[in-house]
Image: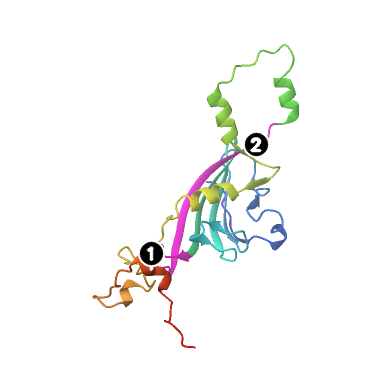
Amino acid sequence: MQNQRFQSWAISKTYMSKNPFLFNTHDLPRRAGEMREYELTIDSHEALGFEVLAIAQDEPIDIDLRIESVAEGILATATVRTEASGECGRCLDAVYYDVDETFQELYEYVEDPRQARKRNKPGKKRPQKSEEDDLDEDLVRQMDGDMIDLDGPIRDAVILNLPINPLCSPDCPGLCPDCGVKWIELPEDHAHAPADIRWAGLENWAGPTGE
C-alpha cells in the first residue's frame, strides 16, 4: 500500500513576486510508485481568462493535487476549482461561472550533465531525430530542481474551457439597439420611429431665435 499524506497548503505570499504556481516536490521520494496528495489554495495571482470573463486576481484558486514518482519524472494530477466573473455578452449584466477542471501533466527529471556527456561522447553513434521528436521535446515540461510549475497546465485547463461569449441566461434578449435599455425591461410594443438621415444634422436644432 502506497504511503499517502494529505496536507492543506496555502501558497506563501513570498512566492507572489516570482510565480505563485510553483510547487516544491521535495517531500516526494524519487522511487517509482511513491505518491503524495495535497490541498492547495492560491490566493493571489494575475487575472486568468478573457476581457469578458476571467478569474480575478484576488479570486482564490483551490487545487487538489496528487503527485506520483514515475521512471521519467513526476506525474501531477489535479482538480482545479474557482470562480470566473465577467459580463453577459448580450445585456452586459454581471455573470459568474463555476470552474471545475482537471489536468494531468508529466514533469521529466532534468538529465544529469555527466550522463549527457557520456551519451554525447565523440565517436558514439547517435540515433537520428525526426521533426516529430523535436516537437515532442518542445512540449515536454521539465522540473527545476525539486520544483514543478503548475502555471501552464492550470491555464490550459481553465482558460480553454471558459465560454468566450458568456450569457446571463441562454434566452437573454439583450439590449435595444436604439436606446440601450434591456429588452426584458421594455414593454412588448416598444419601438423607435425610423430616423431620416437627411435631417440628422438638424436633430438638435431648437429653431430660429428672435433678435
* Residue 115 or residue 126, whichever sits in front: 126
Q: Is residue 36 magenta?
A: no
Q: Position of residue 183 (x, y in %)?
A: 32, 72
Name the residue located 65 percent from the left edge and 60 percent from the top edge. 11
Mark 2 burial class by Cα count in 10 Å: few <14, some 14-19, many 20+: some
Task: State the extent of the magenta-drawn residues as a range.
Answer: 86-111
Q: Position of residue 80 (x, y in %)?
A: 51, 56
Amino acid type indicated by mark 1: Arg
Query: Can residue 71 be seen from the camera position used here?
Result: no
Mark 1 burial class by Cα count in 10 Å: few <14, some 14-19, many 20+: some
Of badges 1 and 2, nearer the viewer stands 1
Secondary element type, mark 2: loop
Q: Position of residue 180 (x, y in %)?
A: 39, 71
Image side of residue 115 versus residue 5, left or right:
right
* Residue 24 or residue 101, whichever sits in front: 101
Name the residue located 65 percent from the left edge and 36 percent from the top edge. 109
Q: Which residue is mark 2?
A: 109
Image side of residue 33 versus residue 98, left or right:
right
Image side of residue 92 versus residue 185, left or right:
right
Q: Which residue is mark 1?
A: 90
Q: Position of residue 126 (x, y in %)?
A: 64, 16
* Residue 81 or residue 97, whichever sits in front: 97
Amino acid type indicated by mark 2: Tyr
117 to 153, vertically: above or below? above
Q: Main secondary structure of the magenta part?
A: strand
Figure quadrant of residue 194: bottom left
